[in-house]
Image (tube, rainbow, N blue to C red):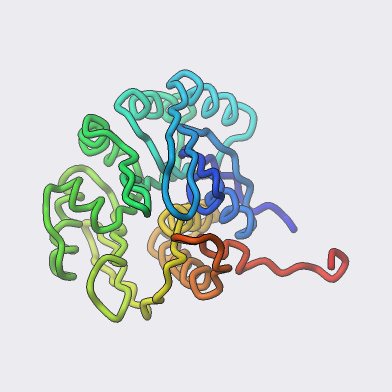
Amino acid sequence: MKINSKILVIAGSDSSGGAGIQADVKTITTLGSYAMTAITAITAQNTTGVMSIMPVSNKVISNQIEFSAKDIKPDAIKIGMLHSKGVINSVIKSLKKINAKKIILDPVMVAKGGKKLINDQAIEILKHKFLSKADLITPNIPEAEVLTNSKILTVKDVVSVGNKLLNLGAKNVLIKGGHLRSKNMQDIFINKKEVVIFKNKKISTKNSHGTGCTLSSAIATYFSCGKTLKKSCEMAIKYVNHSLRTQPNLGKGHGPVNHLNSIRIKRMFR
C-alpha cells in the first residue's frame, strides 16, 4: 500500500491506547498515511480514568518536532494535548521554524473521565496566540464553552459560539455536537463564508474514548491528501461513526473506538 502523505502529531500519550498519540497513529495509519510524533505528556490511564500525567519538557518537545521535520517534511500537523503555557509557546516557535502547513488543532482540555488536562494559563495562551495559527480547530461543546466563556444548549448557540471563535482569530471551526441533547448528531463547520451542519444518527455507546483525537487526526489525514477542509471534515466524521458502530467493547469504563474499521487484510497476510 502506497503512503499517501506524512503527518506530524503533537499530543499526549495514552497508555491504554484509545486516545492521544496512540489513537492518532492508528487513525493516520489505517487511512493510508505516515505518522510522526512529538509527545507532550505521558499519561497513565485506562478506560476508567486518568491516574497520572507526567509532562515532557519544552525542550524535548521542540527537539521532537524540529528534528523529525528536518528529515521528513510533514504535509500536515495535528495538535492535541498542550498542557501548559510553556509547551504552547515552544510549539508555536517550533512550528514557525519548520514552516508548518495545514495545521489542525484539537484543543484537548478534559479527559473522558473528567480529569483536567490543561491549566488556566495555557487556555488563555491557546485562545489569544494559537487559534489564529491553525487552519481548523475542533473543540467539543465543553471546550468551545471554556474558550468563549459561553453556554451552549442549542444548535443556534453552537453557531453563535463558532462565530465568537472566529472573532478570536480562528480561520475555520468544527464544533462537535455530541453533548447536545438530540437524537441526531450535529457537528457544525463554520467559517466567515458558510455554516455547514453534518447530521448523523447519534450512536448510543459508552465506548467513545478517543473520538476527538480520532476525528482530528482523520481530518488532518484527508486534508493532507488534498481534500478541502469541509470535505475532510465530512469524510472524517464518517470514519469516526463507523469506528463507533464497530467498537470492540474493551475495558470496564469508556472503551476505545475501532480504529481498524477501514483496514482490509490482503489474502497473503491471512
> Looking at the image, which residue is at 37% across and 54% down?
112
88 over 19 or under it: above or below: above
25 over 91 or under it: above or below: below
Query: How many numbered discs, if any?
Result: 0
Residue 137 x/y as whole percent: 33, 50
Say which of 14 and 144 sits in front. Answer: 14
256 over 267 or under it: above or below: above
Quadrant of the rendered image containing residue 109: top left
Residue 20 x/y as whole percent: 48, 46
Query: Residue lying furthest right in this view?
Result: 268
Residue 185 x/y as whole percent: 32, 74
**In which quadrant will I find the C terminus?**
bottom right
96 over 245 or under it: above or below: above
> Looking at the image, which residue is at 15% across and 67% down?
153
Quadrant of the rendered image containing residue 177: bottom left
Residue 125 x/y as whole percent: 24, 31
> Looking at the image, which residue is at 45% across and 60% down?
253
Say which of 57 and 163 sits in front. Answer: 57
**In which quadrant will I find the N terminus?**
bottom right
From the viewer's perspective, is 2 left or right of 53? Answer: right
Say which of 242 and 43 sits in front. Answer: 43
From the viewer's perspective, is 95 left or right of 143? Answer: right
Query: Residue lying furthest front in this view?
Result: 252
